[in-house]
Amino acid sequence: MNTVTLARGFVKNSLEKNPTIGQWLAFSEPGKVTLRVGKVNFGQGISTALTQIAAEELDVALTQIVHAPINTQDSPDEGVTSGSFSIEHCGEAVRMACATIKATALARFCAASGAAASTISIQNGVMRSNATAQVMTYWDLHLDDQAGEKVLYDAPQKPQRDHRVVGTPVPRLDLERKLFGGPSFIQDMVIPGMQHCRILRAPNRAGRIVSVDDAAFRQRFPDVELLRDGSFMGVLAAREEIAVAAIAYLETLVTWHLPASLPDCADLKTFLTSAPSEQRIVDELAAKDVSPPGSTRFESWYQRPYIAHASIGPSCALAQWKDNKLEIWSHSQGIYNLKSDIEVYLRREFGDTGMPALVVHHVEGAGCYGHNPADDVAFDAALLARHAQGRPVRLLWSRAAELSSGPSGSAHLVKMEADLADDGSIHNWTHTIWSNGYTSRPGRAAPGNLAFVAAAELANPFVTPVSLDPPMSAGGGGDRNAIPLYDLPNYKVIYNRLLEMPIRTSALRALGGYTNVWAIECFMDELALSLKQDPVDFRLRHLSDPRAIAVIRKAIDQAPWWHDRSQDEEGVGRGFAYARYKNTGAWCAVAVRILAGTSVRVTDISVAADVGLVINPDGVKSQLEGGAVQSCSWTLKEELKFSNEAITTRNWEDYPILMFSEAPVVTVSLINQPNEPSVGAGEATQGPTAAAIGNAVHDALGVRVKQLPITMEHILASS
């Protein structure tokens, strides 16, 4: 077995890189607190929750918290906004920074007034004592002189019993503008004088331009600028519709070399198990265990295809290269990592002394849930801006490029094995995985390599890294959630990370946890039903974690349709699944009801979750509900299709997703644990929902589908 190579650039918390108060807070505007964070909003509502944390700890109104724009000049470097770490890492840093400065403010007020700290109350940043008539505000105390002081890990924080804002369903602070059509996203952004750009993209990451009829293009579009560097080619035009027409015509003038480098779409199992890979034991409990006589050996294979991000809003970036300064506006989830990787290109081109200054500004994109092409389009825009000679450029990717050239979620194969005794005990549990790694974000690969799609297309190309995995301390990648949570006498988890990447893969919501939980929880149903035991009771008999037991019971108890089958029509089925996100985050149980006819439709979902201390219950519920609905789409519909030469998924007809008319009724309940730390919840429902659907299909049809998506084709093939 080879030594594992994990992706670099992960940190344990946000204060490691950003230890001083001034990196988080400023009091320069009277009556306002400027909050600086590095975790970005991309639809999950994190800015509202962080505002609640700051307002609570400082005893100011929500309206007094002002979020500073997020950029690489002024914001704390918090790495990548991913893995549902925003509340755990950034939220805790904000809380400690606020507690530290509040302690300083109290000490200064006590010194000025002579009042004891126990007599002081704070409201809206105004400090009073019932022992003196003196009143002072945070802004009277010149707190910005503490900017260079360290945030104290042991600063006294407000007791949970005194919370007034944290734990309440504060409406999302960013929604009003979006709901009423105001400019909200990078796709809406306009810089005066900007050029509109489009690029060509090969439908195979190994594809290269053989020839292009430049003369014919210039004859038809004499006012459109054409840029080519190797196989990177784009157009710049004064108007967007001209750029769209120009790139469409250019596509007819290009001859591509598309090598037959992609695997057999219809036989991914062979590819996954035969491609060169790095094998390692993720974890094992090797206690002596002899299966009781008469035990039955069970083995099942579960397979997920490559799936696309399929963001509704195509990726977009703006850039301006002027006076030896490059500015980029991007919806990247990791602007500091993006900056560092673009600087790899700049350093090669200009050297350390001649390279331009680089600033990356974050502007929210129209939805994201993983490493979509936001970073790619930012690098593309930088290349085009270099050609534009000081003019700002705006680049929007096409739908075809999003689906065929953006990072995808890896195809993922799991082999489950176990011995089952007549008494229901499980022995010799083995979970074996084959997949590509789950991250190729900027800042993750070996120094000098670049994962941007354009970096490999340049005439002087960069090495494209094969996707790696986050370490287990950050939740893992292909091995995420593979270590069993059930009480087992022994187990082994084996991971084979592919060392070839014919189809580009990177982070997609829940990473390997989606498929691993689907496999584990469907396998648990298989074991239970082989003994003719109730699958929920079977799970409970193998669990001792009280928080796991509580969410399982809650998900069932709040679903009136779970036990009442009196009104069932033909094809109705019920399924259940449980997991703890990353084995360290939210405890989550999901029950579903489906109707299987000419297709499978999920009609009802019951979710129960324990996320520790709840900051904003509405925000948590929205994340859990959104993840469950998205999981329905993945599980029932989504699959990236390709030939040996090209990805053939190019539009919404090729890549169906769940429609609004197909959305189920979702009920979400939270078990609040106010005395426990907040843990990540944003991806907790992905895996349990998929497994619950698979188990419900078996309940309805008696068929165990082990190849996603659960389409009629795969149901018939499994019959």
Image (cartoon, rainbow, N blue to C red):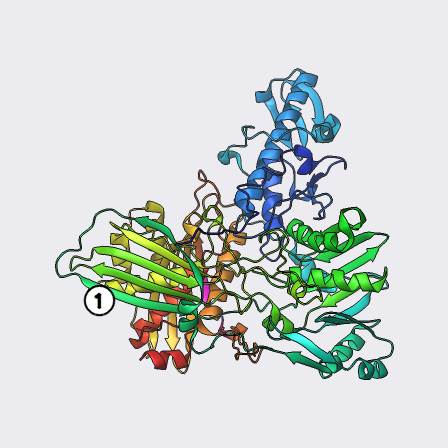
Circle 1 is placed at which residue position?
Answer: 530
User: Where's the C terminus, which quadrant?
Assistant: bottom left
Residue at the (65%, 33%) spot, across then down: 20
Q: Please state if 108 lies on the left or on the right of 707 as rendered.
A: right
Residue at the (85%, 83%) spot, across then down: 219
Q: What is the quadrant of residue 270 in the picture? A: bottom left
> Residue 115 in the image: x percent, y percent?
63, 17
Observer able to see residue 182: no
Whether residue 362 is situated above or below residue 55 in the rendered picture: below
* Badge 1 density bin: few <14, some 14–19, many ≥20, Cα 10 Å: some
Q: In the image shown, does 460 or 244 lie closer to the viewer? A: 460
Observer able to see residue 416: yes
Whether residue 2 is situated above or below residue 161 in the rendered picture: below
Q: Please state if 530 lies on the left or on the right of 53 as rendered.
A: left
> Residue 476 in the image: x percent, y percent?
46, 52
Q: What is the quadrant of residue 125 in the picture? A: top right
| Numbered-mark total | 1
> Residue 629 in the image: x percent, y percent?
49, 66
- Residue 663 counted in the magenta span: yes
Q: Residue furthest top?
A: 114
Whether residue 214 is situated above or below residue 433 in the rendered picture: below
User: Where's the N terminus, which quadrant?
Assistant: bottom left
- Residue 685 counted in the magenta span: no
Q: In the image shown, does 298 or 254 lie closer to the viewer? A: 254
Q: In the image shown, does 706 or 702 lie closer to the viewer? A: 706
Q: Residue furthest left?
A: 293
> Residue 689 in the image: x percent, y percent?
42, 63
Q: Please state if 433 lies on the left or on the right of 288 as rendered.
A: right
Q: Which residues are magenta?
A: 662-666
Q: Secondary structure at mark 1?
A: helix
Q: In the image shown, does 710 or 350 lie closer to the viewer? A: 350
